[in-house]
Each structure stands twice: as C-alpha cells, then as structure tokens.
Image (cartoon, helix red, strand yellow):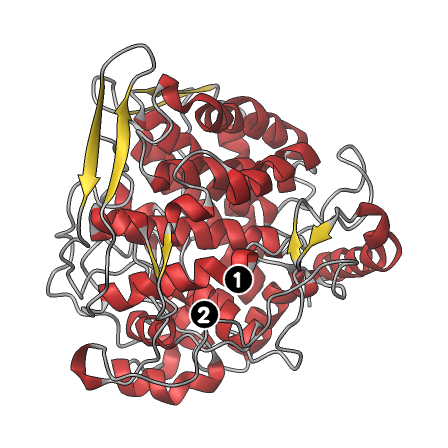
Amino acid sequence: MHETRRRQISRRSLLRATGATAGAVTLSTGIAHGATRTAGSAQGSGYAHPGLLHTGADLDRMAAKVKADAAPYAAGFARLTANRHAQSGWTANPQATVYRGAGSPQNYAILYNDVHAAYQNALRHHVGGDTAHADTAVAILNSWSSKLTSLEGSADRFLAAGLYGYQIANAAELVRDRDDFELDRFRAMLTTVFAPVSESFLKDHNNAVVTNYWTNWDLTAMACVLATGIFCDDEARVSRVVEYFRNGAGLGSVRNAIPVVGDDGLAEWLEAGRDQGHALLGVGLMGTVCEMAWNQGIDLYGYDDSRFLKGAQYVAKWSLGGDVSYTANTRRKGAIGGWSGSETASDAAPVDPTMTRPIWAMIANHYTKRRGMSAPYLTRIAAKAAPEGGGGDYGPNSGGYDQLGFGTLAFTRDKATDAGAGPGAAAGGGKPAGAGSASPSGSASPSAPAADTPGGSAAGPGLATTAAGGNNGDLASTGSGDLAAWTAATGITALAGGLLLLRRRGKAGQEPRRTGGGAHSE
C-alpha cells in the first residue's frame, strides 16, 4: 500500500467513525434522501476521498490482486496496460475553448483523448505503482486547468460538459493528494467551466420542453454535477443530483428513464424504444451516478425497490437478443415559445448482440457481490464482455469514450460477507449512520431460472440488459467467484507475461458515427 493512500484511508476511517451521524441526511424506507456525509460541511472536510468511482479500498484491492496475478484482475490490468492512452509518454494538447456540435470548429476529441489518458495513467499508477504514470496524469490535468476557459458549440456542448466533466473529475480524484497537482485551480475549472453548463441543462433543458431530450442527456449532466460536488466537497450539488435522480421532471430521473415495471421483474428502459447504443449509454451513465453516490453513503442503486436493477436487467436481456416487452410511450418535443411536436416509441428497437460497451462489471458486481442479489442477465452479459477495456478500445469515435471502463479490473469483487452491506462501506468505514439498503432478496431478484435467453442458457426472469453504443468486441466481468463460468462463456484467458486473448476484431472500428455520445433529440 502506498504511504499516501494509507494516510487517506486512516483519515477517512476516523471521519466516518466520529462524524457520520453529524453529516448524515435523513433517510426514509432505506433510501437516502440526500448525501450521507462523512463529516464536516461543504467548506470543511466534506466527502470521503478518493471517493468517486474508486475508493482507497478499491485501489488497494486492485493492486493486491494484480500483484498476486489473480484472475480476472490480471486480464483486466493487461487490457489497461495495452491501451495507447495508458502510456507515460502521453503529451496533453490543452485548448482554451472546446467545441462540440455542428456549425463549430469541433475539437472535442482532443479533450476526451487527453481525459482518458489522464484517467488510465492515474489508474495504472495506483495498480502498478510506477510514479511515471502519476506524473503523466498530473501533467495532463494541470495543463488543461491552466488553459480551458469555456465549452461551446451546438446543444452538443451539454454532452461535452457532462461526459468529460465527470470523467476528468474521476481522473483528478486519483491524484488529488499529489503535491504537484494544482488542486485549487482544478476545482475552479470544474465549478466554472464544466458544472455550470450541466446545471443549466438540468434547470432549463436548453429552453426546450423538458421531455425534448432523451434520458442520457440528463444523465450526462447529473454525472458531471455529482462528480463536481463530491470532488469539491459541495453538499448542495450532491443533494441536487440525488433529488433529481429521485424526482426530476426530465427523462433522466429513475422513474422516467424506467417507466414501467413488469410482473416478470424486468423494467422497461425508455430509450430502448430509440436504439440500442443510446440505451447502453444511459444504463452506463446511471450506473456511474449510482456508484459515485454509493461511495459517499447514498444508496441510489437500491432506490424504489432496486428499480435500476430491473431496468439494467431488461437492457441486458434485450441486448443479448432476448424478447422484451415495451409499452408505447409518447414524449413531447419542442422549444419553449417555439415549435412543438411529439414522438411515439412503440416497440423496443432491433439489437446487435455483438454491440457492447464497458458498463457491465460495475453494475453486476454491485447487485450480485455487494448485495447478494440474483441478476442472471447482468452476470451473463458481463461475462460476455470481459475483460473490459476503456477509451480507445471501442472504436475511434466519441461513443467509444463515453465510459471510463476497465470494470473487470476495477469492480470485480468477492461476495460481501454481509450481502446487505450499506452504501459507503467500501469507502473505508462502516455503514454510515442511518443509511439503509435494499433487501438482498428483493423483487428484482427472483431465484427461479427461466430458459428464455439466446442460445438456450437459463437466466432468471426479472433481469434486463443494458448497453452503450458500439459494435466491436468484448468487455466486462463480475465476480471472481464466477470466473469459471465467464471463461467458459467467453474463452478469455490471462496468459504469461500479461498478454491476453483479446476481443474479436472482425468489426473493429465499424461503429455508428453517433453511437453513445450523440444523444440527440432530433
């Protein structure tokens, strides 16, 4: 364990032991109504750090497992080290203004490539211990915080703010305690360049009818604001996202994104009526929001009887080629005081069973390992996707960079001895005061299998699928206890010297131009 991380963990544990009660926000029916805090105020000690997608305990687990050459972590780490973005020689190319959208001199690819290089180098440092990778990550992040002043373009600028805002915050969270990292300047960039654009979208939706924009538009903004709130110890921002997740008017709130719960335990994902790529993007983003919240003691994963599990299971089953129901849905479109119209989605869109994105390991591990719940479709699709890569592994277009990825390495975990462990436990302390958790045997997890998935495999009802744009390759895995089943399903093996039998390459680079990132209302 690195000395810096040891100090972080001991400080975090002390904060949780002494201040959880003072910082907790009232919970009801086992669900957080706001941010369960470690201690302090928005201006004080704030939230647990590191505490976005990865906690100190997570990072230590990865490092120990890789050092022991344990499967499937070794395969996940090999996927990371093989990525061109994860090399310590990466040189940043910061811009003063980033443009995304038609009619502007688009340069946003420069930003997302640099962001993924910062994240991958920072993660590689924590797992492998080479300080050259931390140096690279810090250099990239410092260069952008010293130059970036605005995000411009068409409505797509909201996507740029949301996607790259949450991602760059996660990269910075991994090096925030380095002496050479310009922490205050980075906070200023998050709070003046990225978060305000996302907050504006959640407030007025680009002056459009609130349902004009599909689910993933809201979720990109929510991810950015939540990551900014946690990184900057800003309780107001965190609470705003938690409330929007639960009760927001837009299509990114959980009941609007997942409007119908079926008797089979599956819940219809609204954007399945649009296309597979954007449905996968939405599931990955909602999982990202839930994971970051969980690491701060806020249980969105279990909210409303684990509604997200039911929606993710639906998308997983659908993406595997299974039959799913879909209730016709009409949404209003248009600009406030301008044009208006409506659009009806009447059935789930066709799917490409080879389409995948690195979103499954995180979600499947939460429900099956942390919570001990049954999620057969999630388990199967995560196995099919293993080992997950990251930005640069799923095609050159923006959709291949919408998730940070590497879930096989980062989120594989053993089953918790207390399957109902509450949120925040992984962040270094015990269950936060007052934090509830969903029952491991909730209605989303029936135990009786049903042979209704492609290929004759048995998978229980009530388990849907999720996906996120792209059509070339394999990705995630879930828990080390399931390794034999995953290996049988995918044929993936860690080889001597850190080499891998990687994903199929028959369709490499042939993803749709707007898969994932192009979350447009038109």
Residue at 52% of width from left, 68% of height from top? 366
Q: Secondary structure at mark 2?
A: loop
CA–CA distance between discs 1 and 2? 8 Å
Query: Which quadrant: the C terminus?
Result: top left
Residue at 16% of width from left, 50% of height from top? 511
Q: Is residue 67 above or below residue 311?
A: below
Q: Is residue 276 left or right of residue 20?
A: left
How many residues crowd around disc 2 within 10 Å: few (fewer than 14), some, or many (20 or more)? many
Question: Are the residues tagged 1 and 2 within 8 Å (C-beta)?
Answer: yes
Where in the figure is residue 261, as x and y percent of width and height? 38, 59
Q: Between residues 308 and 95, which one lies in front from this camera angle?
A: 308
* Residue identified by numbered label 2: 444
Please say whether residue 132 is visible from this viewpoint: no
Quadrant position of residue 393: bottom left
Q: Residue furthest top?
A: 337
Q: Between residues 499 and 396, which one lies in front from this camera angle?
A: 396
Quadrant position of residue 499: bottom left
Residue at 60% of width from left, 46% of height from top? 173
* Residue identified by numbered label 1: 305
Q: Is residue 296 left or right of residue 361?
A: right
Query: Which quadrant: the N terminus?
Result: bottom right
